[in-house]
Image (cartoon, rainbow, N blue to C red):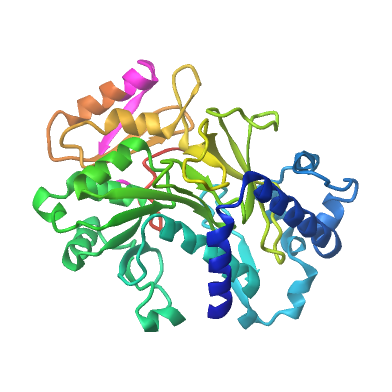
């Protein structure tokens, strides 16, 4: 398995520099093979694709229906390939989705071939962002990390920081070990960057910080970089597809892993958005034959870049991962306000340790916040009313924000 991962690693380090024509050719051939398999071997798709003709170009992808997570959940075991019965439990990798979007989780199953390829795609993002596998990396996560074969040779070692640790204990872990690399959820690290002293921050000087799992606005990124005097690189991934996009040190935007997925950014009518516009993310995985996910609606929104890659890679660019539908809140005109706008307006408040903006079904805004300074509450209200409108009711509560069991501190969301 380690040998297969090494082979895949060499392959994907080369394929990222394919021309866009080569990338599209690979995607089309991979898609056609996946569709043939899905029609034959996956009961869900045998029915779903019965009346759909052959896909002869990537433009034909639009013939296929967009499928939500709820639809997959309702399909039960019909979403898995019939080939699953030939695998022993030890031959499978299995992961559960967080359920943060729908409240329900489902199990993603991979065979060794798919998992090893996806792990190579995952590792590529780190290498491209400056990671050196000889150094131990701080790793914030919701469950203990299992040792891997290469750890015995001093490679890719990770120091587990449980997401259940209080924030000051997390700070102690980071200051005590002086890691060369840090891999963290965006919001908890943003929290640390707001409250850590200059003296303690000086003890944390990694070569690079990698954020993931949550939105990272430019304001958050800039504050973390100022605090720890290093570069922050974001990664966009999900349990379903592992890694999907990552910020390029040269381009400054997100490269999509086009040699692993087909990522579409669509408007409300299902048409591709223009560069610079926000659209909903729809993804087709090209690797996992045990659980094919074809035109799978993520519930995420992203912005397609107006720029061309400066780094010679043939992978498409996204300017921003905006967040999920429930990360938007409504202003007094019932218009959607992106989470970054809310973060930007609250970030400059002096003495504000952290905040969590929650819009209730009524439209009222609850703000959970921590601060030892007077006047912060009034400034929160004034700034949010300035953004959302005077008629919006804002209820600040001096209370620790809620962190999920999987370690996510959602700074802005709608119930």
Q: In the displayed structure, does residue 10 sit left or right of residue 264?
A: left
313 up-or-down from 115: above or below: above
* In the foreground, 252 or 268: 252
Rendered location of residue 394, percent (x, y): 33, 26
Give the residue at x 26% y 45%: 225
Q: Is residue 361 above or below residue 119?
A: above
Is residue 392 located in the magenta-colored stretch of the structure? yes
52 to the left or right of 3: right
Asked if residue 397 is positioned above or below residue 133 in the image, the reply reads above
Furthest residue toward left = 199
| 394 magenta-colored | yes
Q: Nearer the viewer, residue 297 or 391?
A: 297
Q: Can residue 1 be seen in the rendering of this structure?
A: no
- The spot of residue 282 in percent (x, y) is 64, 43
Q: Name the residue located 44 percent from the left edge and 18 percent from the top edge.
A: 332
Q: Is residue 272 visible?
A: yes
Residue 323, percent across and down?
48, 40
Q: Quadrant of residue 251?
A: top left
Q: Quadrant of the N terminus?
A: bottom right
Marker count (numbered): 0
Left or right: 253 as drawn, with respect to 193: right
Magenta residues, as a range? 384-401
Residue 298 horizontal side relative to residue 348, left or right: right
Please name whichever residue, 368 or 290, is drawn nearer the observer in this view of the structure.
Answer: 290
Residue 69: x %, y % from top left: 65, 50
Taking the spot 39% from the left edge, 33% from the top edge, the residue there is 340
Of 46 and 245, the residue lying toward us: 245
């Amino acid at each position: 398995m380690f040998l297969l991962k090494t082979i895949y690693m060499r392959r994907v380090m080369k394929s990222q520099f394919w021309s866009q024509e080569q990338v599209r050719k690979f995607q089309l051939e991979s898609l056609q093979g996946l569709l043939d398999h899905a029609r034959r071997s996956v009961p869900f798709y045998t029915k779903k694709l019965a009346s759909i003709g052959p896909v002869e170009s990537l433009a034909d992808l639009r013939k296929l229906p967009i499928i939500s997570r709820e639809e997959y959940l309702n399909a039960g075991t019909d979403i898995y390939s019939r080939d699953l019965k030939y695998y022993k439990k030890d031959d499978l990798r299995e992961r559960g989705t967080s359920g943060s979007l729908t409240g329900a989780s489902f199990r993603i199953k991979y065979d060794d071939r798919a998992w090893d390829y996806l792990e190579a795609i995952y590792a590529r993002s780190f290498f491209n962002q400056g990671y050196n596998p000889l150094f131990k990396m701080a790793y914030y996560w919701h469950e203990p990390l299992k040792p891997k074969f290469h750890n015995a040779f001093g490679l890719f070692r990770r120091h587990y920081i449980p997401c259940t640790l209080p924030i000051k204990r997390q700070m102690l872990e980071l200051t005590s070990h002086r890691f060369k690399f840090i891999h963290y959820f965006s919001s908890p690290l943003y929290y640390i960057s707001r409250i850590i002293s200059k003296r303690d921050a000086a003890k944390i000087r990694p070569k690079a910080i990698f954020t993931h799992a949550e939105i990272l606005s430019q304001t958050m990124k800039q504050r973390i970089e100022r605090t720890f005097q290093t570069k922050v690189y974001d990664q966009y991934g999900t349990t379903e597809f592992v890694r999907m996009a990552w910020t390029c040190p040269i381009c400054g935007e997100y490269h999509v892993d086009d040699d692993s997925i087909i990522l579409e950014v669509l408007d409300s009518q299902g048409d591709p958005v223009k560069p610079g516009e926000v659209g909903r993310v729809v993804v087709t995985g090209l690797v996992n034959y045990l659980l094919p996910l074809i035109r799978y609606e993520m519930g995420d929104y992203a912005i397609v870049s107006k720029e061309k890659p400066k780094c010679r890679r043939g992978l498409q660019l996204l300017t921003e991962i905006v967040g999920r539908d429930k990360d938007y809140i409504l202003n007094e005109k019932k218009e959607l306000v992106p989470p970054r706008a809310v973060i930007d307006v609250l970030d400059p408040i002096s003495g504000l340790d952290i905040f969590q903006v929650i819009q209730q079904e009524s439209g009222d805004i609850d703000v959970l916040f921590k601060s030892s300074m007077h006047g912060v509450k009034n400034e929160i209200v004034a700034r949010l009313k300035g953004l959302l409108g005077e008629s919006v009711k804002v209820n600040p509560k001096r209370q620790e924000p809620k962190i999920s069991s999987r370690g996510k501190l959602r700074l802005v969301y709608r119930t």
